[in-house]
Image: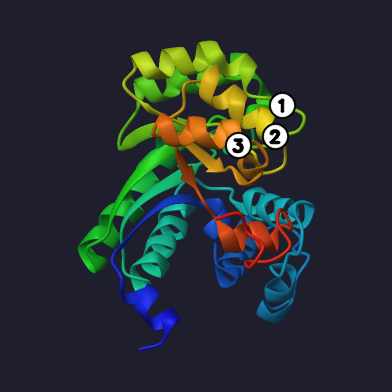
Amino acid sequence: MDTLELIRALPKAEQHIHIVGATRPETLLWLMEESGRDAPFENLEEVERFFQYSDFDHFISVYSMVSKFIVDEGQFERVTYEMLEDDARCNVRYVEASFSAPDHVRQGLDYGLMVDAINRGVRRAREDFGIECDLRIDLVRNYGPDYGMEVLNWIEEKGDNVVAVDIGGSERGFPPEPYEPVYNRAREMGLHLVAHAGEAAGPESIWGAVEKLGVERIGHGTSAVKDPDLMAYLRDNGVTVETCPMSNVRTNAVPSVREHPV
């Protein structure tokens, strides 16, 4: 058994995966057909080439393209099921899947119906593959803390299978500190606290997330290695870093797996 086969065979938990970001190229083609909109690609080969991103901006363009063509809440069932099917092939037993609900609500979709569709996909995957999945709602930092409070209202009204909140989005332009009241409320609601930090910004972004938001986990956190005091803080306070080496290489956050700070 080689190293890759061994890694695939090990039972695993996946704590950092975005539902929309895990969409298969062939499923994007299906979404385009379903949307009735003009599609920029004619075949699967063209979509697969588009998916070969090499920096963060290109990744965002892929992610945004998928989001644009999700025009019906029910489509999330297939996208979620396929994500979990792919995870199950790698012997992932548990997934905490991130869902950027605000992106889609702002495009006219209904939060509750999307959560229902996602959970249908989760239940089907559990029945077919024995994989478990909870949901993490990404507040999307670009929309600001007031909108984040509104998202918490949605979760209070319909929190089916939702166990955590996160702030993804544009880290450089939207630091974590303004979200302190939002995270205080989320904590009172019994939600786990996560934040993307230290991927597109420096250690100061991680400091803000741990000191002001009180997060339990940091998404990516590659820049933490630049600050020995921060590394010691994360260790001493049991803050987990959700490391994503291949993602970081593909988005050019780090130059290679060999040079990844993990």
Amino acid carrying mark 2 in the image:
Glu
- Mark 3–mark 2 distance (CA, rounded to whole Å): 21 Å
Q: Position of residue 33 (x, y in %)?
A: 63, 65
Q: Position of residue 35 (x, y in %)?
A: 63, 56
Instruction: Note whether residue 44 is visible.
Output: yes
The crowd level at tag 3 (other Cα within 10 Å; few <14, some 14-19, many 20+) is few
Q: Is residue 100 above or below residue 148?
A: below
Q: Nearer the viewer, residue 244 or 93?
A: 244
Q: Please state, as top left, top right, bottom left or bottom right, where the C terminus lies in the image.
A: bottom right
Is 167 rendered above or below residue 114?
A: above
- In the displayed structure, does residue 74 sit left or right of residue 202? left
Residue 87 at what x, y percent from top left? 39, 65
- The residue beneath circle 1 is 174
- Tell me the tag on residue 192: none
Left or right side of 48 for 5: left
Amino acid type of disc 3?
Answer: Pro
User: In which quadrant will I find the N terminus?
Assistant: bottom left
| Residue identifier under label 2 | 171
Task: Write the residue at 37% across / 71% down.
Answer: 90
**Mark 2, other Cα within 10 Å: few <14 / some 14–19 / many ≥20:** many
Nearest the viewer among 144 and 5 is 5
Who comes first in sequence, dot 1 or dot 3? 1
Query: Which numbered mark, 1 or 3, is in the foreground of this view?
Result: 3
Observer able to see residue 105: no
Q: Residues within 10 Å of mark 1 (few under 14, many from 20)?
A: some
| Residue linked to disc 3 | 228
Q: In terms of secondary structure, where does tag 2 sit? A: loop
Assess whether mark 1 and mark 2 are in contact (beta carbons under 8 angstroms).
Answer: yes
